Image: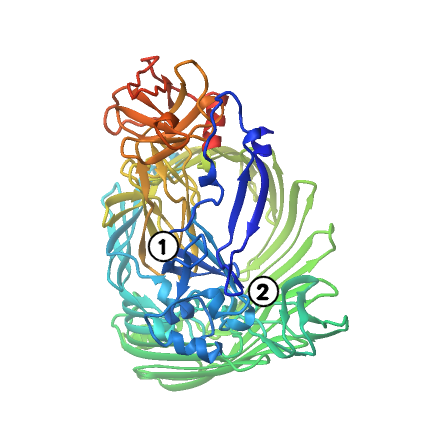
Amino acid sequence: MLILAAFSMIETVAYAQAGQAESLQVAQVEFESGFLPAGSGKAVDLSRFEKGNNVVPGNYSVDVFVNQNWAGRMQLPFKEQVGLANAQPCFNKKALEQAGVAVTKLPPEIGMQLADASVCLPIAEIVSDAFATFDFGEQRLDLSMPQVALSRTARGYVSPEYWDSGVNAGILGYDFNAYRYNNKQFGGAQNTYHLGLNGGFNVDEWRFRHNGSFNWAADGTRKYQSITTYVQRDLTALKSQLVIGDAYTSGELFDSTGFRGVQIASDDRMLPDSMRGYAPTVRGVASSNAKVTIKQNGTVIYETTVAPGPFEFDDLYATGYGGDLDVSVLEADGRTHSFSVPYAAVPLSLRPGVNRFSATAGQIRDSGLSNRPVFAQGTWQRGLSNLMTGYAGITGSAGYAAAVVGGAFNTPAGAVGVGVTQSHTSIPDQGSLNGTSTSISFSKMVKETQTNFTVAAYRYSTGGYFSLNDAMRTRDAAAGGRNTATVLRQRDRAQISLSQGLGERGGQMYLTGSTVKYWNRSGTDVNYSVGYSNTYKNVNYSVSASRQRDSSGAMGTEFYATLSIPLGKEHPVTLSTNMSRASNGGRSMQATLSGAAGVSNAFSYGVSANHASGGGGAASTSSGSANAAYHTPYADVSGSVSSGSGYSQGSFGVRGAVVAHPGGVTLSQPVGETIGVVEAKEAEGARVINVSGLSLDGRGYAVVPYLTPYNLNVIELDPKGLSTDVELKATSQQIAPRAGSVVFMKFETESGRSAVIHATQPDGAPLPFGASVLDEEGNNIGTVGQASKMFVRGLQDKGHLTVSWGNGSESMCRIAYDLPVRQSRAKSENLQRIEATCRADGEAALEHAATSDRQPDTQDVAAIQDQS
């Protein structure tokens, strides 16, 4: 209560300059000394606290946020302004453009001044009604700007100039698994091993990658298989990737094909979040300053204020396959008018104006072929309007050519995709074949009935149609004198996915199904299932039935039911059971208990019991199994065991990576395509909040195993567990990495011995509340808090501290201290406590020579909070 009362008046003020408010807003505080803790009997000069941390002139590296959206990290000069307490950030033309200001819309006189690159001005003098707020501690500069002064960019946009290419680095990811199986009926024990490798290195803008696997067994069988080997880099201007080596085509318009060659293909991840996927452009007209609200299925997905005249929104986030958009325009006088925009999409839909392309040339890479024929392929897609997306493609190789053309249509009745592919294939000794493959797909969300046709598709191919992969295999078989009928060619394929909501508490039903027929094989492959799921309180349950028929005509049906009950509170624990019954009479029942424990739930486990009675007279069996996994900062370790009638099994696995970077070599959890390396010297044990089980190693490094490329990623460190002698100067950073990069994030730290000092004057009176604590160099390292306690960091093993509460020698005293010697790299988890006397004669002495390593008491905590 006393501390709260000390803040007798808090007021945010803006200092006037030339008729405009100062752009940096500063909290001004006045302290009423009568409410300060009594007992010292001495007045304390608290004027230094009245205006917070004054910003002095200089260059600052700051995170700039414009209307709460991150615009980038900039090096800005802060210059002194006459009559103002704080130095002001000033902007030149380049900095304004980086902040997203529409420079061409500025008044001519301002534009003429900024034409000189050496000129910079405060934001309030450049843009009317704009102001800045600077958080000195976070080094964050917030700019409040009228929307009309900003260049129009899509939501989620991060300028390519902030895409970080990372550092030169090497990566070796591994996935090792040892498996032992012992079955008395089928040959006894068998040991097999698998090692998956995924590694490479980065040099400047280039990323070299290799992916392969090595399998071997105790009987001596060994095989290494190369999956992909390539070099890759961004082509920023084309928003695409250049790939050279062994890779695969995308499979969007033609079947995916392995190749060894060169490919340039669009990378939609380079687009802002709000431009990825399909969403229609919403256009309308406002008669006044109006509020526009856009809803989908009753949920507000976008809302903003527009000026009088036409408006257009082309940066709505994609929200799935269905649900028309309801647009409401609320005018300033209260009038409202509404309209609807159809919204349904099939997989190839693009928003208006967006392009997607690929161009590939090289050799076909297929282990089933005796040679590697040369081929080329090109595809192009473009969003033409809200109604239509068009696409076309062509591919060819020796004895083969094909072309495709089609479109995706967004209509009030649903989204429809139509495509036609024509092929020409020359087969050795069998002549030439021409064929056509036609496809149609449909997607629709029926809001009134909560029915969602996720996709319903049908494809029919004539007898002479071949895909590229089928054509190459057929030609290879014919050239080698083998039977070409072994290469199966689809005649028609149909599939559907349907979900039906049954109200708020009625649950969800679903239906999925597919059928496939072939030209050169009798019979039809049929696969469909139907199910229902719901939740009662916190219990989840579901039932389903599936039916399959293979090419031999054999039909099988299976019924399945599951029940899941959460049990844990602080750490998740789930009890689940499932039961199944097959049409051949087989039945099974399984019960599983799974959960997680530890910090960030890094340890996970599961135990299960199973009982099965086989169909067709097979004997009943019972079995049990257990598994566990642990996420360490250096690798993921897992293991499993199981045992049943006549068999037993055990496995051990470890997955991780080794990353070489400018700071050395660091072990890591399994890594993705894009990763980061955190450096915080002497901050051993600090936890990386973004990743489960990840903390800094003994050298102060950690690998963030996955980052989202071209997006703003926030990396945060939790200082809990740090030595009390180490302070993180910042606990978070923002980074927008390029795909495949290894970005380096350095967190500054400050080290020094720390202690809670309880010091009194020679007569036992407490020191003045709020007095400054200075080290031997005159640096302010603390403040006297309640009960004459102070928390200080940056101490030597022994020395003197000066306590000052005014001007002159009569307003200061000195404390002598002597800390216990600590071995280098020893971690201090507990606070040192010092009992001392502050002497005015400059001959300070310790009243109590003993100091102790211990947990702070509540008074110590209060003292530390006072320092904050």
Q: Is residue 517 above or below residue 699?
A: below
Quarter that holds the N terminus: top right
The answer to whether residue 610 of the structure is visible from this angle is no
Callout count: 2
Disc number placed over residue 320 in the picture, else none:
2
Residue 577 x, y percent position in the rendering: 60, 38
Residue 281 lies in what quarter of the image? bottom right
Residue matched to label 1: 57
Q: Is residue 720 visible?
A: yes
Residue at (45% x, 52% y) in the render: 85
What kind of element bears circle 1? loop
Q: Would residue 151 appear left or right of 244 to someone viewing this image? A: right
Which residue is at a point 72% across and 71% down the rendered structure image? Answer: 332
| Tag nearer the camera, 2 or 1 | 1
Amino acid identity at mark 1:
Pro
**In terms of image quadrants, where is residue 33?**
top right
Residue 10 image point, x, y percent = 58, 43
Amino acid type for the residue under numbered disc 2? Gly
Q: Residues within 10 Å of mark 2 (few under 14, many from 20)?
A: some
Q: Earlier in the sequence, mark 2 or mark 1?
A: 1
